[in-house]
Image (spheres, helix red, strand yellow):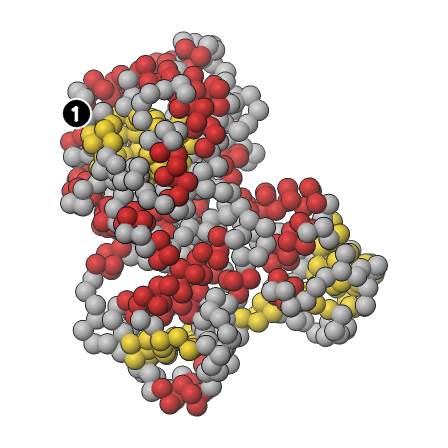
Amino acid sequence: MQFTSLFTPLHIGPMTVKNRFVVPAMSNNFALPTGCLSDESVAYYAERARGGFGLITIEATVVERKAKGGPRKSCIFDDSMIDGFRSVAEACHAYGAKVSVQLQHAGPEGNAKAAGYPLRSASAIPAACGRDIPIPYTTEEVYALVDLYADAAERAMKAGLDAVEIHCAHGYLLSSFISPRTNKRTDEFGGSFENRMRLPKLIIEAVQARTEGRIAVLARINGSDEAEGGLDVHDSAAVAAYLEECGVDALNVSRSIHLMDEYMWAPTAYHAGFNADQVTEIRRAVKVPLITVGRYTEPYFAELMVREGRCDMVAFGRQSIADPHMPELAREGRLEEMLPCIGCLQGCVRMMMQGQPLTCLVNPGVGHEKDLTLPKTETPKKVLVVGGGVGGMCAAFTAAERGHEVKLVEKSEALGGQMTLAAYPPGKGDITCMVRAYIVRCEEAGVNVLLNTEATPEFIAAQKPDALILATGAQPFVPEIPGIHEPFVLHAADVLAGKAACGAKTLVIGGGMVGCELADYLAERGHDVTVLEMRDALGADVIVEHRKLLMRNFAEHGVKGITGAAVTRFVSDGVEYRKNDREEAAHGFDSVVLALGSRSYNPLYEACKELAPQVFVIGDAVRARRALDATREAYDAAMSL
């Protein structure tokens, strides 16, 4: 497919964007504690401009001092913050990108403890269970809010930015006024549609007046709130049409409030462009340019969306984190090299919610963009990497790209390790794209890959490496329980790999992520599945958005659970277990499958720690954890050579 539509320019108000690739606003926690953008912020945005994105949107940026909900939040409520935005604008403009900033007040979704001030909103409705009840703004205070946005937009213009985006989505402050679900006011800002839209209307008019048409004014809206009593797509079409009449130059259509945040940062199982129907409905209502978002990880469907006129630009959010050079690779037809977002949420959403700097499982270079333009090493080393999982591959191609001579040794017949098996459960197929991309990166970097090769201490000594990276991974945890070594006990990895088949009625021992995803895999194929877990809940270690879908699948397929249970004996048709100090049993199963997690596998360090001047142990070989840890440690090891 030729991506002709994606690479055509577009006029948005007074700015012309060179193509249809957008980096949307995504909090990254790179800002300084003062709220000013840091050198890391500048390098992060500049790298995406260097990679070919036409419109770069600076993260949600706080417009009111009292609404700063985190220590590393980007802010624009003071003139001292202008210089940081100017640095981002200049860095991105050097690559031909246009720059916008999203103006945000989190309202009821803020963090009162971090801000040091109570939450404020349209009405006294908490965002969720356990969250602070916000204090409603008085009528006079609502009018005062308008100037905060206008002041922020003027600062953006002075910094040389090309646009501002007014955040009206996701249950934040302006969303709380627009939606009848959260706006229970009876003054001129509540009740009718016209009244609920009054605040965003006043803000847009004030921003336009203050900036005198010199920068574009965009608004981000929900395609729907995905909550009963909130906006549906038909309401949102009316919101879009109203904002168009207010004079916005473009609309960025997102989806949902935080209670349903699986629609905001969709997990792996969501397909690219899952918001397409909502954007198409809104397209019928407006003529201004529309930006769509929704787990776009490759350009094919995005090209169709633009080509068919269903939208005008596509926001590649987390994909721009995973590979900031996606547009360049698409233009050059090198998509097999592209590092894909796999929707794991481990390094982006999870870190963001913890107030920690953004990172990425697939691209551990996130946050280290300043290093990406460094020249290759002047002192190449012989580097030996043992283990061809994603940690080993990441270490290998990163070191090779830095100019080192790298040999990667894998004892099996293929690269990928446990990550390959992780692609088998329902909705996880994109993980295969990551494994393939890593293999291609190794090939392109010139890594010498040796498969079916056992890296013994003698082999390693013969290589005489300057640096040795041990990425030997982990092995299944098999505790000493009577009957566990009997041949009727299967292992999750063997079942997923097609090396062992389960009977119709299957008992999975272990209800963590591996066990639950295996249960989902079997249940989808018609097996009657029961999961037994020692903890009090199934999937306790699964990231929230993934767990929601997992539990929905369990309910649909009738997967049963036994929790708080410790196995005491394996028998041919089930297990005996202890629960609440009572001995119980689960019998009548055709198959029993073990999924109790993993233990580190590091047989080489003690024998090989003197065989190279530099020796690193990374990933699960240190301790069985998430793949995020493996790739981060791999990157750090390779960059320290």
Q: Nearer the viewer, residue 175 or 451?
A: 451
Q: Which residue is mark 1?
A: 214
Instruction: Determine the residue positioned at 55% across, 27% down.
Output: 227
The answer to which quarter of the image holds residue 285 is: top left
Up/down of 340 relative to 452, above or below: above
Up/down of 145 relative to 500, above or below: above
Q: Residues within 10 Å of mark 1 (few under 14, many from 20)?
A: some
Q: Is residue 124 visible?
A: no
Up/down of 67 relative to 240, above or below: below
Measuring from the top left, give residue 120's x and y in whole percent.
42, 26
Instruction: Determine the residue positioned at 24% across, 60% down.
Output: 371
Instruction: Determine the residue positioned at 32% across, 14% down.
Output: 245
Left or right of 347: which side holds 428? right
Mark 1 is on which residue type? Answer: Arg
Measuring from the top left, give residue 193's x and y in whole percent.
44, 12
Measuring from the top left, give residue 290's x and y in whole percent.
35, 28
Measuring from the top left, give residue 546's x and y in whole percent.
55, 47
Instruction: Determine the residue positioned at 25% across, 36% down.
Output: 8
Q: Is residue 344 visible?
A: yes
User: Quadrant where the C terminus lies?
Assistant: bottom left
